[in-house]
Image (cartoon, rainbow, N blue to C red):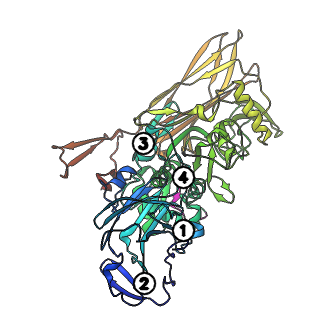
């Protein structure tokens, strides 16, 4: 053997004039038939040791993958058992295990790796004889901790006096090598076992939505171990035409995948739709897990309809966990969008203090979901590794494609927005100011109110090993009003982010809105408190606008407009109660049923502007699932799903969708 046994490849034979004969499990390559076949080592059988309860999958924590193939993690030894025609003699016998990936294996590119079992002869991957008994030899192989991630094929090659004998290609000897967050040498190493169990091994997740003061939960089956999901994730990289040699770098893998999970530019996995019309696909709120989406994409080779931000984040989470990259879904409440990094969201009022919808184009999403994945960042200064933001929702282009990240969370917190990738965009999502401008009759714009605390109000993710939530806002930003926060914002301005410098005087009238939990289809009262903090009489000419909105903050319809005049004595609090009738908003409702109230007003005596905004997320009826009879392993059970119709009319065209990891694949039932 020289650099290797000679990589097997199409159109190239290991001997000048071989004769090919199939016999048993191996293809035998000969010059003339040997006079004494028993004199040299020959391969009888190969055992990949791929059983779910076997040593390989148990030690590599891949026992939950629903696959008969060997699945291991890089940077960690795995074992293969070889059976020869006679006992192996290490002094005289020479053999190698060859691992190939991609269409054109090449030793110099790391796509062809020969592994030798003797210490005198080693290549990139370490090999050793772990056990030898009679004709059986167990070989230990340790892939490099930065090797290519994907599907390999293994050959066994034996040196004989008559040339090299190599096993024929057989899918049985395929194996998958994944990222390894348990290996300190791997770029995705995460030294926190509860976090690893949550962010790599957990199949069931909770995604947070609703409003920051009325948080709702959505259960999601990531299903990263389900049958076919691993192949679907590798197909995504194939479909992106990502070079094989880049597939060991988590930075390149996550950046490419953030583009491929959405269908913009590259016919990726999911088609986005925020219109409310989902006639030609599945409504985003109907999905219960990632499995059906990924398997449909891999089999049809066409983008799947439809997705919104939490669907993109959930499917991306499955992709990352399946390949072994620690990841979690994160929700940012009041997320600023499309502001081109100017750190301002503009709301335009007319001269009377009423919102001018024709000129107010910026929107604030009630919430936005993205992913965090864990990795080192050798391309950045020390200290900016760890959690990285990646976002597959197509919002803005990055290097010409709809993608975002990986952006260091530490860089975002400290305002280091020049670091790749897209840190400035994520920084704006959590740090923008809401600026109210008064537009005069001559068109002049005057800032009258600046709210620095509305955007990025709270950032949540699921707590490890629990069904509770964890507030990680402090990982993205310093507390409002602290000297550290001011320093970070000044640094952001140094990188070209424009903020509203003027600070209009605060009005001496406050407006307080209540916290409400309202079931869908019910009337409710919106009670407003006007608080006069001055020692003089105040009159406020107010506008109360009620709108049905998509969760992206885009208005679907205005269903209510009131313009009360509120008079307050010195230091007096006056309540203004508005009855909101369900018949007014029900006919305009869109999915997720969000009502957005904007209250603006002008203090008659001072000309000051008072404002308040409130999102009311209407609560859907709760589903209850009951299982009848005794629960026995491998026996059928009956599940009953119940909910109460909250409306005064019958429901038509009802779909129930269900799935359970390891229990049942996604299924649905239709009720006319």
The kind of secondary structure the magenta stretch mainly shows is loop
On the image, which quarter does residue 81 sit in? bottom left
Residue 95 percent coordinates (x, y): 43, 71
Disc 2/disc 4 C-alpha distance (Å)? 67 Å
The numbered mark, 3 or 1, whose residue comes first in the sequence reads 1
On the image, which quarter does residue 342 sit in? top right
Locate the C terminus by quadrant. Answer: bottom left
Query: Residue, x 40% and y 35% (percent of image)?
Result: 466
Query: Residue, x 34% and y 44% (percent of image)?
Result: 649
| Contact flag, marks 4 and 3 (Cβ < 8 Å) | no
Query: Residue, x 66% and y 26% (percent of image)?
Result: 480
Circle 3 crowding by C-alpha within 10 Å: few under 14, some 14–19, many from 20: some
Instruction: Say if residue 583 shows up in the picture.
Output: yes
Query: Residue, x 61% and y 64% (percent of image)?
Result: 265
Please give the residue where the numbered disc 2 appears in the rendered image: 162
Please give the residue where the numbered disc 1 appears in the rendered image: 111
Circle 4 crowding by C-alpha within 10 Å: few under 14, some 14–19, many from 20: some
Q: Which residues are magenta?
A: 265-273
| Contact flag, marks 2 and 4 (Cβ < 8 Å) | no
Q: Which one is in front, 45 or 659?
A: 45
Disc number for residue 274: 4
Circle 1 crowding by C-alpha within 10 Å: few under 14, some 14–19, many from 20: many
The answer to whether 44 is drawn above or below residue 427 in the figure is below
Please give the residue where the numbered disc 3 appears in the rendered image: 197
Question: Which label sits in the foreground, 4 or 3?
Answer: 3
The numbered mark, 2 or 4, whose residue comes first in the sequence reads 2
Residue situated furthest left in the rendering = 629
Residue 640 percent coordinates (x, y): 24, 45
Circle 2 crowding by C-alpha within 10 Å: few under 14, some 14–19, many from 20: some
Q: Is residue 331 left or right of residue 543?
A: left
Residue situated furthest front in the rendering = 91
């Amino acid at each position: 053997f020289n650099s290797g046994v000679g990589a097997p490849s199409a159109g190239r034979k290991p001997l000048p004039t071989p004769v090919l004969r199939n016999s048993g499990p191996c293809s035998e390559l000969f010059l003339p038939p040997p006079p004494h076949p028993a004199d040299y080592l020959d391969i009888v059988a190969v055992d990949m040791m791929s059983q779910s309860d076997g040593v390989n999958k148990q030690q590599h924590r891949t026992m939950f993958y629903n696959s008969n193939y060997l699945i291991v993690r890089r940077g960690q030894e795995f074992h293969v058992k070889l059976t020869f025609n006679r006992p192996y003699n290490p002094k005289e016998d020479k053999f190698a295990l060859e691992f190939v990936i991609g269409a054109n294996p090449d030793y110099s590119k790391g796509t062809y790796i020969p592994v030798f079992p003797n210490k005198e002869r080693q290549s990139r991957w370490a090999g050793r004889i772990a056990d030898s008994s009679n004709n059986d030899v167990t070989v230990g192989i340790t892939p490099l901790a930065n090797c290519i991630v994907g599907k390999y094929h293994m050959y066994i090659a034996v040196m004989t006096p008559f040339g090299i004998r190599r096993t024929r290609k057989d899918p049985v000897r395929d194996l998958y090598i994944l990222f390894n967050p348990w290996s300190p040498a791997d770029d995705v190493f995460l030294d926190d076992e509860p976090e690893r169990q949550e962010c790599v091994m957990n199949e069931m997740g909770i995604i947070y939505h609703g409003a920051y003061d009325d948080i709702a939960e959505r259960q999601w089956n990531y299903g990263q171990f389900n049958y076919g999901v691993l192949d679907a994730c590798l197909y995504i990289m194939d479909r992106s035409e990502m070079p094989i040699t880049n597939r060991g770098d988590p930075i390149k893998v996550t950046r490419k995948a953030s583009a491929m999970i959405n269908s913009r530019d590259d016919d990726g996995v999911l088609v986005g739709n925020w219109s409310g019309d989902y006639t030609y696909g599945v409504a985003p709120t109907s999905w219960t897990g990632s499995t059906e989406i990924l398997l449909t994409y891999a089999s049809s080779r066409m983008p799947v309809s439809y997705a919104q931000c939490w669907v993109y984040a959930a499917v991306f989470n499955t992709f990352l966990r399946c390949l072994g990259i620690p990841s979690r879904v994160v929700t940012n409440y009041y997320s600023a969008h499309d502001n081109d990094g100017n750190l301002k969201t503009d709301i335009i009022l007319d001269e009377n203090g009423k919102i001018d919808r024709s000129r107010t184009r910026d929107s604030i999403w009630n919430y936005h979901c993205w992913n965090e994945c864990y990795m080192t960042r050798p391309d950045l200064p020390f200290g900016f590794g760890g959690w990285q933001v990646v976002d597959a929702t197509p919002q803005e282009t990055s290097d010409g494609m709809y993608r975002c990240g990986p952006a260091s969370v530490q860089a975002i917190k400290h305002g280091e927005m020049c670091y790749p990738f897209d840190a400035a965009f994520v920084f704006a999502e959590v740090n923008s100011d809401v600026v109210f401008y008064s537009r005069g009759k001559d068109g002049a714009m005057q800032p009258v109110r600046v709210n620095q605390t509305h955007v990025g109000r709270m950032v949540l993710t699921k707590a490890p090993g629990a069904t509770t939530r964890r507030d990680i806002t402090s990982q993205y930003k310093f507390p409002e009003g602290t000297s550290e926060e001011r320093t970070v914002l000044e640094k952001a301005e140094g990188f070209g982010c424009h903020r509203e410098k003027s600070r209009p005087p605060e009005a001496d009238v406050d407006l307080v809105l209540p916290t409400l939990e309202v079931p869908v289809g019910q009337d409710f009262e919106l009670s407003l408190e006007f608080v006069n903090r001055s020692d003089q009489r105040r009159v406020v000419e107010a506008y109360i606008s009620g709108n049905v909105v998509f969760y992206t903050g885009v208005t679907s319809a205005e269903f209510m407009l009131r313009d009360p005049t509120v008079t307050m004595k010195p230091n007096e609090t006056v309540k203004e109660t508005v009855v909101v009738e369900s018949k007014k908003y029900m006919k305009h409702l869109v999915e997720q049923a969000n009502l957005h109230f904007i209250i603006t007003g002008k203090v008659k005596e001072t000309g000051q502007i008072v404002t308040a905004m409130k999102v009311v997320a209407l609560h859907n009826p709760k589903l209850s699932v009951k299982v009848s009879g005794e629960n026995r392993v491998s026996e059928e059970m009956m599940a009953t799903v119940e909910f109460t119709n909250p409306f005064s009319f019958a429901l038509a065209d009802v779909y129930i969708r269900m799935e359970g990891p390891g229990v049942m694949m996604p299924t649905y039932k239709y009720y006319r």
